[in-house]
Image: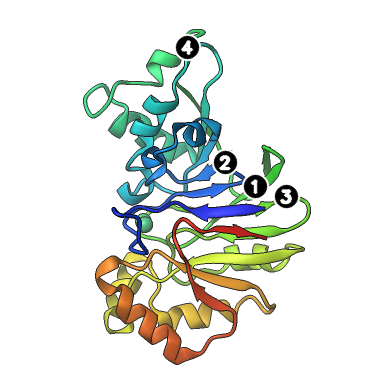
């Protein structure tokens, strides 16, 4: 399985402002920077977009992406998300004011998009991948995803603070190779992290002990103004298997 966190800073660097993972080139998890890929052919190859939640860093370029890849005809991109998130996307973004109502415009044979509601714990197959939505613990209802291609599995817990069900499910998954886990705040802002459903290095360290097996822990979602402090605090902890994500790098698992 190939996984890339799409870059979201200009010129492309390690600062992460937005969230979009590309899996095997055809499945996206979140659409923060999806519509910014300069290579339009790469955008057109993405046919399924799984959303974790409606926060703007995760959906920011969804309208731009759908505009970029539209072609006349019945074939269109599929957005998969919790029913409430599909509703937010439709009525708060594609509402005819912020952006045209692509859902309404997709009623006939000419389609921009179709929405597929997900059920927590129910695995769905797309593009050769078995993808399981699982609840995590963020300020709003949020789904993490476990993605399995039959040879290897990778976990994407999205934005979350300390959580339980997700790890219980992931711990039972065979062939888990890596987890892309967030650390948003430094330890000095632990209270803010707890109040907003995010991790700081201390809670991250406690969290990875819930998965009693050796996997790659790839740190994502460092808020840019705290990125250096978070990196320094994580380095002090000397946690095994932990590395900082490099946006734009293709990870092969
Ligand atoms: Zn969020
Ligand atoms: Zn976020």
Callout 3: few (<14), some (14-19), or many (20+) C-alpha neighbours within 10 Å? some
Eye-nearest disc, 1 or 4: 4
Callout 2: few (<14), some (14-19), or many (20+) C-alpha neighbours within 10 Å? many
* SS type, badge 4: loop
- The quarter of the rendering in which ligand 1 is drawn is bottom left
Q: Can residue 145 be seen in the rendering of this structure?
A: no
**What residue does disc 3 label?**
149
Dot placed on the residue nearer the N-terminal end, 1 or 4? 4
Q: Which residue sits at x=43%, y=83%?
A: 234
* SS type, badge 3: loop
Dot placed on the residue nearer the N-terminal end, 4 or 2? 2
Of 121 and 24, nearer the camera is 24
Mark 2 beta carbon near ligand 2 (under 8 Å): no
Compute the Cα span from label 1 to label 3.
9 Å
* SS type, badge 1: strand
Compute the Cα span from label 2 to label 3.
12 Å
Q: Say if 92 sits above or below 108 in the image.
A: below
Disc 1 and disc 4 in contact, CB within 8 angstroms:
no
**What residue does disc 4 label?**
72
**What residue does disc 1 label?**
131
Q: Say if 200 sits above or below 54 in the image.
A: below
Q: Say if 203 sits above or below 55 in the image.
A: below
Disc 1 and disc 2 in contact, CB within 8 angstroms:
yes
Compute the Cα span from label 4 to label 2.
21 Å
Dot placed on the residue nearer the N-terminal end, 1 or 3? 1
Q: Which residue sits at x=38%, y=77%?
A: 200
Q: Which residue sits at x=32%, y=43%?
A: 60
Q: How is the image coloured?
A: rainbow
Q: Can residue 142 be seen in the rendering of this structure?
A: yes
**What residue does disc 2 label?**
27
Q: Position of residue 15 (x, y in %)?
A: 33, 63
Q: Position of residue 78 (x, y in %)?
A: 53, 30
């Amino acid at each position: 399985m190939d996984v890339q966190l799409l870059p979201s800073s200009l010129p492309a660097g390690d600062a992460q402002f937005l969230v979009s993972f590309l899996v095997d080139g055809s499945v996206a998890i979140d659409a923060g920077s999806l519509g910014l890929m300069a290579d339009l052919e790469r955008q057109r190859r993405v046919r399924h977009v799984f959303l974790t939640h409606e926060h703007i860093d995760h959906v920011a370029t969804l309208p731009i992406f759908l505009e970029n890849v539209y072609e006349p005809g019945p074939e269109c991109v599929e957005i998969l998300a919790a029913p409430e998130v599909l509703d937010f996307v439709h009525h708060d973004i594609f509402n005819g004011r912020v952006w045209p109502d692509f859902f309404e415009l997709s009623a006939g044979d000419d389609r921009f998009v179709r929405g597929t509601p997900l059920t927590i714990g129910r695995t769905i197959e797309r593009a050769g991948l078995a993808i399981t939505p699982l609840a995590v613990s963020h300020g709003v209802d949020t789904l993490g995803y476990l993605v399995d291609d039959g040879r290897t599995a990778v976990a994407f817990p999205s934005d979350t603070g300390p959580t339980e069900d997700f790890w219980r499910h992931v711990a039972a998954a065979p062939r888990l190779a890596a987890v892309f886990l967030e650390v948003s705040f430094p330890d000095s802002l632990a209270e803010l992290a707890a109040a907003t459903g995010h991790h700081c290095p201390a809670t991250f360290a406690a969290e990875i002990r819930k998965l009693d097996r050796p996997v790659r822990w790839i740190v994502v979602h460092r808020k840019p103004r705290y990125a250096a402090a978070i990196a320094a605090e994580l380095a002090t902890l000397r946690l095994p298997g932990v590395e900082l994500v490099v946006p734009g790098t293709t990870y092969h698992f």
